[in-house]
Amino acid sequence: MGNRRRIVFVTTILAALGAYAFLLFHHPATLDLDPIYNGKPLSFWLREGADPVISGKLTRVQNANEAFNSAGTNAIPVLLKLLRAHDSPLKLKLIALAQKQSLITVHHVPAQILHLEAMNRFLRIKTTASNAVPGLIQIYHDNYSYHSRYSAMVVLTYLGPASRAAIPIFLAESANTNVALRNFAITGLGSAHAQPEHILPVLLNALNDTNGAVRATAAGALEHYGTEAIPALPVLRDLISDPDHQVQRAVRRALEAIEWQAEIEPTK
């Protein structure tokens, strides 16, 4: 009788988890089937590769790389799906209950690990991932979780001019109290290279940030604007003596780039 109750318990838990997974991963925007590699969908290989369990890690990562390379840009819907992964309290509770039994092994790859996997994969195809921008912006606004939201934003900052539709996000996040997120937003404003009338004042303000990394990033972002960044020259020149050597180097590079394009005598 005990075994029977245990089987019923396990079956119920697994059914609940299966229903949850179906609702989560069959998002309306990504109903297309995963690209298939060696008889299994790409999402399977990426989850296997992302799994932090050490045993067999190298082989799993190699398989994931091969499956990903085979898919090319067809991997984008799958990566967006991974960025939507969310470990709700209910989901974690069901998994914890299922893991208490010994009949069936229930293994879970945390959502944050899947987000990191998607981010890293996107960076490998950033020059051909422009069609992911609308989906990434939607994930940011849907705010499945803090980590999901900002993982999507970080990917956007690396997509260059293709991410111009995300400029409102970068402008808003440039005032984030989290230094790392503020820094990524400034990076995005530089790589987007558009709307200088809105972006340059923000970059100029960031040159006075209390954090040296943000000041250096702002100087680097100004390089993208060339002669449009001439109004920033006085502030950049003042920062040549910044106490942070990282800032000094970034400022020197920005001055050289802007002054060369504007045919202005170089700052000594």
Image: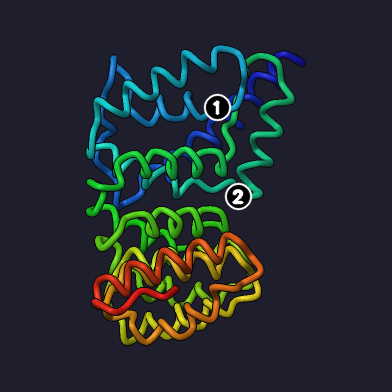
Q: Which residue is mark 1?
A: 51
Residue 2 shown left or right of residue 23 in the figure: right
**Position above or below: 140 against 200:** above
Question: On residue 211, which mark appears?
Answer: none
Q: Nearer the viewer, residue 84 or 248?
A: 248
Residue at left offset 53%, top offset 32% = 15
**Position above or below: 246 against 193:** above
Quadrant in which residue 42 is drawn: top left
Real-space CA distance between mark 2 and mark 1, rounded to the nearest whole angstrom: 19 Å
Amino acid type shown at disc 1: Asp
Counting from the top left corner in percent of width and height, residue 263 is at 24, 76
Q: Nearer the viewer, residue 147 or 182?
A: 182
Residue at left offset 26%, top offset 35% = 33
Amino acid type shown at disc 2: Ser
Residue 255 shown left or right of residue 162 in the figure: right
The local secondary structure at tag 2 comes to loop
Residue 42 shown left or right of residue 146 in the figure: left
Q: Which residue is mark 2?
A: 88
Quadrant in which residue 165 is drawn: bottom left
Would you say residue 268 is visible in this rendering? yes
Say if mark 2 contacts mark 1, CB within 8 Å. no
Q: Residues within 10 Å of mark 1 (few under 14, many from 20)?
A: many
